[in-house]
Image (tube, rainbow, N blue to C red):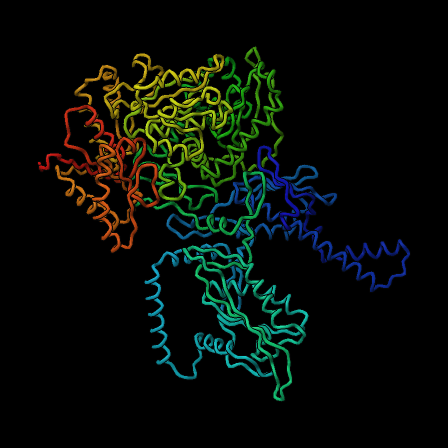
Amino acid sequence: MNAAEDQLLVSLTTEVVVNVGPVRFGEAQRDTKTETLKAKVREQSMKEKSKKSNKDIEKEASSSKKELEEELGSQRTKLAQAACALLNSGGGVIRAEIENEGYSYKQHKIGLDIENSFRDCIQSDLFSQYFDIVQEGSCLQIWVKTWSSENVSQHAVVSKARLCCLKTGLFQRSATSIVKTKPLEALLFLKAKRASAKKDPAEMAGLSRKRARLWDNAQQSRGADVQVEEDILQAAARFFKRDKLGYREFLDFAESTEVEFKGLQKAEDILGFVGTTLPRYACAFANARGGYLIFGVGNDRQVTGYEGSLQAEQLEIKVQETMDVLPYFHFCTSLEKFRGQCKTMPIYDADGTRHGCVLAVRIEPFCCVVFEAAPDSWILKDHREMRKLRVDEWIELMIAEDPDLSHFAPGFQIELSRSCKPPLAKTVYSAKDLTCLKDLRSSLCPGDSSGITHKPEELCAELFYEYPGLENILNKKMEELQISKGVLIFSRSWAVDVGLPQHLCVACDVLLVATDTVPRLYTMTVDKNYLVSPASLLLDYSSSVARTLKQKLVNEGGYTQKVCVIPHVIEIGSNGKIKTDLRLPVSYPPAYEVSRGDLEELMQALTIVLLRFRSFLSDQLGCEFFNLLTIKQHEILTKNLHKSKKLFVYGLPGSGKTIVALQIIEKIKNVFHCSADEILYICENRPLCEFVRAKDACQAVTRFSFLRGKYTQSVKHIIIDEAQNFRSEEDDWYEKAVKITQAAAHKPGVLWIFLDYLQKTHPMDCGLPPPNLQQPQEWLTVGVRNATKIYDAMKEQMQRILGTPNEPDIPYEQLYNLVSEARCGHSLGGVLVQAEARDENAIADYIVGKCLQYFRDGYSGANIAVLCDTVPESKKYQPLLKSRMSGPMRKLKLSIDFTEAGNEKRGSIVLDSVRRFSGLERGIVFGISLHPGPTVVTENLLLCMMSRANLHYHLLFEDQRGERS
């Protein structure tokens, strides 16, 4: 099937459904070898009283049989492609109209050829592991579970490829034959090619010389009559140089791994034969050591050639056109194209008579990967459009692995590995020893407690108070389902939790997870809401949320078992009882009920869906992976934004204020149905502003730009980060922010302010309202960014700052309380070095020496930041560090540069002031400070420097008097 000509329709209900149209099902009904068609043709001929001969009747029967085979083949292809797309996209349903009357799945099954195409698709005989079939009247629904690679055991080799594909498009040479490369073989081949591409060219040249010496030694040690592969390859190379051949001569070499003969009989077949034969051999030879494909020589090595009037140029054009369209992919930095040469050799007999030609094609070995055709692998784009994967997309998904953070940040532990998970799943890490995923799951959605558990308790109490009758309705539903043990997970909007817009008519959503039933989503509304939206539309909304949640459980949470979520819409009447109860009549297979053994995995996947966020380190490493929120961060993010439109979030250093600030922006979009332009993020320093702006989630400006801009008409919601470093020396930024968010009196916008007075880096008024007016408040006191040694030093520094209170507008008593609750959320030790006071040259020598050591240990410049008190200080150190770094870098064959915060090039070391680096982080930080003075600002700068380091922190004091302590 050509997808462009016959695009399958994808529809959305509670599942992603691929509609394949009419299909004939059944074992006997799809058997084209029966005499049924012939009998029908004969019968029809008799009815028409035709005088057709038996030969004509047989011809018509044969033609009809061929048409039927083509039709059944097209149906089979559509089903296989739809199955492949759903397997690769998180699962779903294939819906087919039953073409043949009287069909019953229980009696006739689906047909052996369809079963085999599905088995070929999953490279397994475990049909029921991936497919469940339900007949509904004249339609057949094939439920497809997500694809996932498997391990035989925890430490075993992966037994299946990461991606499902019908054909890999790759061939390999096996002795004197070519064979299709299966998905797992393709995976191993791609990994080997990638590893080879990363090797140093000098090393590869050395290996080539070594192989040549070994070959010479082998040549000398064996007898002259022994022919090996290398002899054949050399003989074929000599043959390729010949200008003519003798008719019926026998070549002095046979077929081998690098040589293939193809005999020819008819001249008119040569162009088509070359076009269909060359791609697979070119692919097989190019991906190995190269080789020769010779047309016009039989397997007996006798030269026969082909007859005809074709000119040599016509064949050469055909060969070049065929090879030019073969897809290829580079792992290396080369832009080399796939190449080959062809040559036509005329054939003469002894008296000089011409007997056609031989066509020889030499295929050069390719540095990376050549395909016979693009892989036949499908995916659902945005769960709405089924399309074939491009070569680069297919390779990326096939060889996807967890990013190696061992050198970048050993403080991470993996919570979700891409290994053995669905194709679209991404790696999830958490800070090492920070409350582990199992503990987070128990807090958010326990699945092993007795009775029916309600989570989260505080939200449940609020909702039961707001909507009398809600608790009784849910209890009644549990009784109807005969569920005595499970968990009901409440949310103001599960739509917002899974990244969809909130429906204004929905009071809350409740997710039921229990064993021996399928998960259910109860969308609760009250009768007055139907004045705005009819119940039917709310059912569409609930179905959309249920479907999205199912997809996220698989593609984000990594759940590999069969799963579906059934939506219900319940209207609570004014008397507190059920007024309307709507649900879609979905016939799901029994295998989709949650088993006791799968409950733990399902709860873990659900926890990851709720807590994961894109790691700030993804951009530095060049690959996307995710981290997990803490429970407190999640609690703040799940606040009712309609009631918590104004909030002050106090966060201690390293507690994740910026993480929460960026996450709440996404929540605001979905809760208030607003665009990125309607949300404004404000911070003090430009690098942090540019970091946020690059995410395209909102407008991002500095305080300076905000005061000069006009935002009254466009902006509705404002998020302010690092507010303690704002200044009120020009205009009142706080008053302006309040006016903008309060512009519509009946619908004020969100104004959340994130701050940490302990990191205030100037002595001036920051423009915040008095502490007693900074209400309501939330606190972040758990350190998640810094290693324990660094965090312990940070806590001592916090206490030192609080020991000398001298700014009247800072709420020191409240800060005492925050610091008393402060704790590091993990046990990773890290490195903290405090060097003696030195002059600037000694400090530069120290930094360069340590950086070289880090580079030898596998770190890169992207892991390192050098921070000074001020920008002029950083400018002073730039030439000192560059001059000392250049020579050693050349010896290490590395290219390392220094750059300012916000202008990072991949692999560059940040060299800037600590103020400009505020809100950002690095694994290794060198802090250069003037000799400590008595001012609070100096102490705060030291705290800021420490808080920027994830794992290694070196504190260097510069004594401006030129002395050493």
Closest to the observer: 745 or 380?
A: 745
Establish if 808 lies above or below 119.
above
Image mark count:
0
Q: Is residue 913 above or below residue 246?
A: above
**Apparent side of residue 145 relative to residue 657 in the rendered image (left or right):** right
Q: In which quarter of the image is residue 299?
A: bottom right
- Residue 733 x, y percent position in the rendering: 36, 19
210 vs 393, left or right, is left
Q: Is residue 494 visible?
A: no
Q: At which x and y percent is residue 492?
A: 48, 21
The residue closer to the viewer here, 753 or 96, is 753
Q: Is residue 878 visible in this depiction of the protein?
A: yes
Q: In which quarter of the image is the C terminus?
A: top left
**Snapshot quadrant of residue 635:** top left
In percent of the image, x 66 and y 74: which residue is there? 265
Q: Between 561 and 532, which is closer to the camera in this rendering?
A: 532
Percent across and percent down for residue 915 are 27, 30
Q: Is residue 187 left or right of residue 1?
A: left
Work out which residue is located at the far bottom of the displayed protein and give it. 351
Image coords of residue 897 (percent x, y):
29, 46
Q: Which residue is drawn at 74% across and 43% down?
A: 102
Q: Viewer-proximal residue, 573 or 313?
A: 313
